[in-house]
Amino acid sequence: MSKQDVSTFARKYWPFSLLALPLLLGLLARTVAGGADVADETRVLTPPKAHTVQSLEIAKDRFVATPQPRRMTPQEKTKAILQQYEEELQQDSASENTEAILIAAGNLYRQKLRDYKKAAHYYQRYIDEFPNGPNISLAYVQLSTCFQRLNDGMGANRLHLQMQKVFPKDSQEYQYAQQMLRVH
């Protein structure tokens, strides 16, 4: 093997060279020491040096998998959001966010949790507290849907009669309420 072949081999396989170097040095040291077997030697155990312990701890932190916190399910996330809404409503029911929170809470209960009774509570609260609010039509229609899902025909009929009193005769809401009264 020529000098150039050794050089090419070393450049190409340098990671293996790094692994083989300690082995070669160990063999060399053993040969220089007179070829004594490990079994014949009397060894004195010494505690590891501080920098070795630190290196091991750093490696452990980097490479040992640490348990990750459990991810929340979509239902748990929804319940956490609803809990925040409820806390905000309890702290300040006259907040500028109250209208949006009431509609959002109703929507989350209805769409995500399919809890139509609680959804109806929030829609009814919106109707009671914000009769001229920008989402009043939505609140009435969604409350109607909740009553239908709960098989509460009497509640739905009362709501549809109320809608006919609140909305003008030529409005879509009035026509919706009229059509729903015919169905029941």
Image (tube, helix red, strand yellow):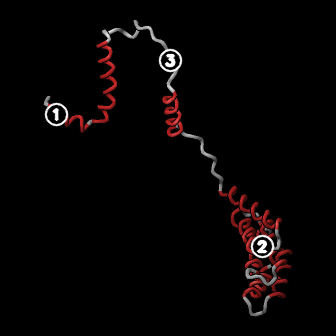
Numbered disc in front, either 1 or 3: 3
Q: In this view, does 21 lie above or below 184?
A: above
Which of 34/135 is in front?
34
N-term-proximal mark, 1 vs 3: 1
Q: Where is residue 83 in the image (x, y as percent from the top left)?
A: 76, 60
What amino acid does circle 2 point to? Thr
Give me the disc on residue 46: 3
> What SS does tag 2 mark?
helix
Query: Disc 1, disc 2: CB below 8 Å?
Result: no
Which of 111/151 is in front?
111
Res 104 quadrant in image: bottom right
Which of 148/84 is in front?
84
Which of 139/129 is in front?
129
Q: Where is residue 55 in the image (x, y as percent from the top left)?
A: 49, 33
> What SS does tag 1 mark?
helix
Q: Distance between the residues labelled 2 and 3?
A: 69 Å
Res 164 quadrant in image: bottom right
Give me the disc on residue 98: 2
Category of crowding for the residue at label 3, using alpha-carbon neighbours closer than 10 angstroms: few (below 14), some (14–19), many (at least 20): few
Q: Where is residue 22 in the image (x, y as percent from the top left)?
A: 34, 25
Task: Identify which residue is drawn at 39% across, 11% down.
Answer: 38
Task: Identify which residue is drawn at 73% across, 63% down.
Answer: 114
Farthest residue to the front: give it. Answer: 50
Task: Identify which residue is drawn at 73% across, 82% down.
Answer: 134
According to the picture, the residue beneath numbered tag 1 turns out to be 5
Give me the disc on residue 134: none
Q: In this view, does 35 lie above or below 145?
A: above
In the image, is 104 to the left or to the right of 48? right
> What SS does tag 3 mark?
loop
